[in-house]
Amino acid sequence: MTFKTKRVGDVIDEIAMGPFGSNIKVDCFVPSGIPVLNGSNLTGFTLTEETFNYVTPEKATSLKRAVAWRGDIVITHRGTLGQIVYIPADSKHEKYVISQSQFRVRCKETEMLPEFMVYFFHSREGKHQLLSNTSQVGVPALARPSSTFQELEMPVPTIAEQRVIVNTLSALDARIAENRKINHHLKKIAQAVFKSWFVDFEPFGGEMPVDWRVVEFSSFLTIRVGKSNDPSIPLFSVTDTGIYPRSDKFNKNLSKAETKNKIAYETDIVFGMSREILNWGIMRAPIGGVSSAYNVFAVASDINSKYLESFIKAHSLYFKDLIRPATREGQSVDKSALMLKSMYLPPDDVLAEYYAIEDSLTSEIQGNGKESAHLADLRDTLLPRLMSGELSVAEI
C-alpha cells in the first residue's frame, strides 16, 4: 500500500517565523515566566524541557506570532538544521516563545497529526526534503523557510492510519524516555553515595580518616603534547558533561589542519574551551584526537581515574577558578592553578568497597543504554517503511 501525498501547505492551518533578534535580546530574560526555546530544546521528536530562558507574559504577548502552543511543531531554520519537534499535550508549560532561528507550524486537525509530521521529517526522505533548500553561506540556513516548507510533499494517510503508526513509534520512544529517566535517577544515586562517602565521610564518623593521604595534582598529572597525523584516529570534543565522539555532536572539523590535533589516551584528563563553565572529562576510549586548543594531561597509573573524575564533579566550586581568559574566543584552563590543586585519596580497600556499589549502578545504566540503542535502531528501521506505506502495523 502506498499513501497519497500532499503539499505540507495543504495540511497545515498556520505557519509563523520566530521574532527578529532585536525583539528578544538577552536583557529580556527574567528568572521565570514564559519559556523561550533554543536548539537544546529541539533534540529529539518531542520538546526537551530540561533548561529554559524566560520572558515575562507581557513580552510573550507582544510576540504573539512567535508563541507556540501544545500540539504545535517547532522547526530550526538557522544554525543546527533538521531539528523538528512537536509540543506534547502533557508539556510542562502551556505555551512557549520560539527563537529567531525557529518557525512554528500548526496542523489541520482533520488532515494531519503533528506527531506524524514530525516522524516523517525525521525519516531519511523527510530529512532530505527538509534540508533541500539549505544555504551554506555563513551560518547554515534554510532559504525562505516558511514558504519552501509549505511546498514540500509528504505522505498523508487517514487520521486513523496516522494514529496507529504514531502509537507504534511513540511506544518505542516512550520506553527510551523511561530508560533515560531511570538512568538519570541511577546517576543521581551514584553521586549521592559518593558524596556520602568522600565528601561528608558518613561511613567514617563524619571525619576524614587519618590514613587517607592528600596528593597534589602536580604529583600525578603530566602535560601531554603529542600531535596526530593519522586520519584513522577518532576525533573527540570536550563539553561540560564529559568527552564525546565528535561525530555524535558536531559537523565541523576540529581544526583546519587535522595534523594539529592533540592525542589523548585512555584515563587522560582533557580540558576544553568554554566561556563560563569548566569543560573537561576523562578519556574513556583507548585513543582519540582532540583540538589543539585543548589541554591534555596524562594521569599517573596509581591514581584511580574514576575516583578523580567523581572527586572533581563533587567539588566543582573548588575547581571553578581554573577558567581564565584566553587569547582566542572562549576560555582556557589555568594549568599552573590546576597543578596546585590537591585531593584526598582513600586506601585501595576503601575504593574497592565503594566501587562494588557504584559498578552495580553503572552496569544497570549501561544495560538500559543498550536496550535504548536497540529500540532506537528498531524505530529508525520501521520509520521510513511505515511512513511510506511499505509496511503496515499489522505486519510488525
Image (tube, rainbow, N blue to C red):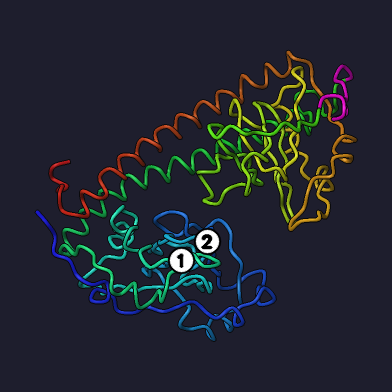
Q: Nearer the viewer, residue 326 or 42?
A: 326
The residue under the point 74% across, 58% down is: 329
Question: Residue 324 at x, y = what percent?
Answer: 83, 51
Q: From mark 1 to mark 2, how far is it between C-alphas? A: 8 Å
Question: Residue 27 at x, y = what percent?
Answer: 70, 76
Mark 2 = which residue?
39
Q: Earlier in the sequence, mark 1 or mark 2?
A: 2
Quadrant location of the C terminus? Answer: top left
Q: Is residue 213 magenta?
A: yes
Q: Looking at the picture, does residue 141 appear above or below residue 126?
A: below
Q: Is residue 90 magenta?
A: no
Q: Looking at the picture, does residue 326 appear above or below residue 75?
A: above
Question: Residue 149 at x, y = what percent?
Answer: 34, 72
Q: Which residues are magenta?
A: 210-221
Pointers 1 and 2 in contact (C-beta within 8 Å): yes
Q: Answer few, some or many: residues within 10 Å of disc 2's Cα (few below 14, many 20 plus, some between 14 and 19).
A: some
Q: Looking at the picture, does residue 184 appear above or below residue 51?
A: above
Q: Nearer the viewer, residue 216 or 203?
A: 216
Q: The residue tagged with tag 2: helix, strand or loop? A: helix
Q: Amino acid at mark 1?
A: Thr
Question: Residue 15 at x, y = what percent?
Answer: 37, 78
Q: The residue tagged with tag 1: helix, strand or loop? A: strand
Q: Nearer the viewer, residue 144 or 118?
A: 144
The circle on residue 76 is 1
